[in-house]
Image (cartoon, grey):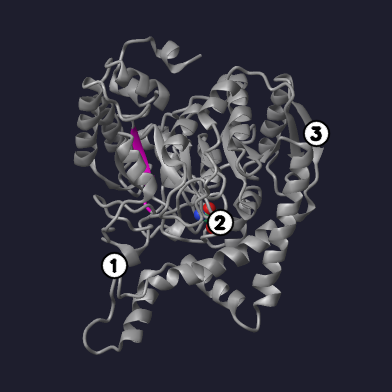
Amino acid sequence: MSDTQRSGAGAASGSELISLDAAELARRIHAREVSSVDVTRAHLERIEAVDGPAESGVHAFLHLDAEGALAAAEAADRAIADGAPASPLAGVPVALKDNLTTTDMPTTAASRILEGWRPPYDATVVARLRAAGLVPLGKTNLDEFAMGSSTENSAFGPSRNPWDLTRIPGGSGGGSSSAVAAGESPLALGSDTGGSIRQPGAVTGTVGVKPTYGTVSRYGLIAFSSSLDQIGPCARSVLDAALLHEVIGGQDANDQTSVSAPLPPVVEAAQAGARGDLSGVRIGIVTEFSGEGYQPGVLGAFTDAVRTLGELGAEVVEVSCPSFTYALPAYYLIAPSEASSNLARFDAMRYGLRVGDDGEHAADEVMSLTREAGFGAEVKRRIMIGTHALSAGSYDALYGKAQKARTLIVRDFTAAFETCDVLISPTTPTTAFPIGERADDPLAMYLADLCTIPSNLAGNAALSVPCGLSADDGLPVGLQIMAPALADDRAYRVAAAYEVARGPGAGPRIPELRALETTR
Ligand code: GLN
């Protein structure tokens, strides 16, 4: 049943507008049944109602630009009235993770070191959204510099999971996913270095996509681990994610790792998948991603999803990818190594915070005082691990070995994709955990990305699609679908077919925020 059928076509109350998919919003805006200004206002009102206060609200946004959003919405309405809509998503609101540079809004990466910084240029993805007539609402919360799995590492306080406000919304892009899950925005952008789009998607019951490395420009993404970082869409439906993916994707001269191959036909694939036939598709279950440490409710929902995929005509087999067990340790050497180098640019001279600039301190002292005060504990931990892993005495044993493990992981994927079109696993081993539960236990926190990291290391495409609620706690579970590099369309096709067959099994897509409403 579509949203239109559920709520009766034609009506356009604010509460209805915030529950509609981006594709349906775009259809109505283009048919001039509703204006982009009304749609934007409805979302701004929703944000006003549920996002704050930071101590108890969803707290998905670090910065809201109501004025800019309404101006962009008016421009989209005008273009449509003139018969020249910029793109299929023109007029639809979108939220931006706050590690994407924006000329008209601050960009902090949720770090004190960048507090108040106004970038001089827009990230390519942001420029493309604007050119396509989308309406940026504001900047969303994240773990500082995208390092974390819960948003608890944000210098500005955590975001909360709309399904249960005492729990984490995942990370690092928990702000983007919780905004989408809470009906604050139909679409958002995230960045995924080890799972930061897919894991928040899984635990908030939304769709999150990590495109093939190099197919979405990283220009203007504040670099964490440049060989792993990839920007991608967050949405409430597979088709919406595909529509946004097509707006942001494609080669960019400003990103030297950007690939010239044409963007895989993700929208076409999502539409084809929605017809619900997966016959001829071979799906491999990664056997390494189950067992100890996996919540029974997660495995239960995953098993149901496997059955559904079989009913859709797919052939489902088991495949072993033995090197995937090295992915987590390899990632936690490679990502911090690259981060230690990328974060050297925050030197108190060029951006944001400057501490000790009082004429009493030498430049190197200002630099260390600023970094001491400006970076949070997890960022410092990563810089230290990375610096150590790259140091002359440890390089071969740590960084070098991690790169060898990376090669083995790539080989496992290559072998598995020789017999399977896509691979699947739960997106995360558990559902959303309570805020604070893993905050002092980095290793427990790192385990949240066990299943998502291999695709970053190999650079292939992967997404998470909601796969029902865990029988343990009633919280959303994600199904991860991985596809070969430049075959993102395969993952979309399978996800769209699954989404239709799954039906309303994931419960209401916009939860009621009970806890919040009773505290206000
Ligand atoms: N949670 C992982 C980390 O802390 C992944 C983060 C990400 O994808 N940005 O590094």
Where residue 437 sits, quadrant-wise, is bottom right
Q: CA distance from mark 1 to mark 2?
A: 26 Å
Q: Which residue is mark 3?
A: 317
Where residue 275 sits, quadrant-wise, is top right
**Callout 2: CB less than 8 Å from ligand 1:** yes
Q: CA distance from mark 3 to mark 1?
A: 52 Å
Residue 249 image position (x, y, % from top left) = 46, 41
Residue 412 image position (x, y, % from top left) = 76, 50
* Comes first in the chain, label 1 or label 2: 2
Confirm or deny contact between disc 1 and disc 2 (CB under 8 A). no
Residue 187 seen? yes
Q: Please tell me whether residue 96 belongs to the stretch shown in magenta.
A: yes
Q: Which residue is mark 1?
A: 352
From the viewer's perspective, is 95 left or right of 340?
A: left
- The kind of residue tagged 2 is Leu
- The kind of residue tagged 3 is Val
Q: Please tell me whether residue 471 belongs to the stretch shown in magenta.
A: no
Is 24 situated above or below 146? above
